[in-house]
Image (cartoon, rainbow, N blue to C red):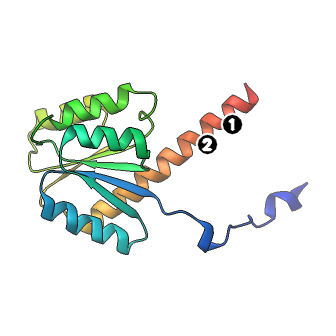
């Protein structure tokens, strides 16, 4: 009985594991490029959108593991994008981290109300952002595994 609980999990070879994909929605091309490179150095696959509509389309078609979202974009604000992601069955499970220069209490409340998981103020500590990205992906994976188990037993 206890032997099965103590068996080591079987790991897939590293070469077949796909990296988590991170979508960066930010109109600051330099910031998106630096963040994308940093994420790739950490083993993620990063891709970017420079406006809200393009970001929503990429989120729906590419299903990233996480989205890093700016609030100020040329076409849609980040709150609207976050709300649309949360309201869509195709994207509601994707965690969103808002990365913004605005940090007033009302902005923080609106960000949470729109559905973001974490709020990070620019300029940001890259190590802290990386920690939050990993945490949000882990939480999302745990939540999805719990839903899969509930469907199988329910």
Q: Is residue 21 left or right of residue 35?
A: right
Residue 96 rendering spot, x and y as whole percentages:
33, 44
Q: Residue at x 61, y 42 (%)?
A: 145
Indicate whether 26 appears above or below 16: above
Q: Which residue occupies the foreground of this view, 151 or 48? A: 48
Q: Which residue is mark 1?
A: 149
Q: Secondary structure at mark 1?
A: helix
CA–CA distance in space, label 2 to label 1: 6 Å
Would you identify the image quadrant in which residue 109 lies?
top left
Q: Position of residue 149 (x, y in %)?
A: 68, 36
Toward which corner of the image does residue 88 lie, by quadrant? top left
- The quadrant the N terminus occupies is bottom right
Q: Tell me the crowding category of disc 2: few under 14, some 14 to 19, or many 20 or more residues within 10 angstroms, Cα based.
A: few
Q: Which residue is mark 2?
A: 145
User: Looking at the picture, how far across and down is residue 75, in whole percent?
Assistant: 12, 36
Q: Along the line of sight, which residue is nearer the eye, 87 or 154?
A: 87
Mark 2 and mark 1 residues within 8 Å of each other at the beta carbon:
yes
- Say above or below: 56 vs 6: above
Q: Looking at the image, which residue sits at the far right? A: 1
């Amino acid at each position: 009985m206890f032997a099965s609980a103590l068996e080591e999990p079987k790991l897939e070879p590293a070469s077949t594991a796909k990296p988590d994909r991170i979508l960066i929605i930010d109109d600051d091309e330099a910031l998106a490029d630096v963040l994308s490179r940093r994420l790739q150095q950490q083993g993620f696959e990063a891709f970017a959108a420079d406006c809200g509509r393009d970001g929503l389309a990429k989120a729906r078609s590419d299903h990233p593991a996480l989205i890093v979202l700016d609030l100020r974009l040329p076409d849609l604000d980040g709150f609207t994008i976050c709300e649309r992601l949360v309201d869509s069955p195709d994207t509601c499970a994707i965690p969103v981290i808002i990365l913004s220069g605005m940090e007033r209490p009302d902005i923080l409340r609106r960000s949470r109300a729109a559905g973001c998981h974490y709020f990070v103020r620019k300029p940001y500590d890259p190590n802290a952002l990386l920690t939050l990205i990993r945490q949000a992906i882990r939480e999302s994976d745990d939540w999805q595994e719990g839903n899969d188990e509930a469907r199988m037993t329910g």
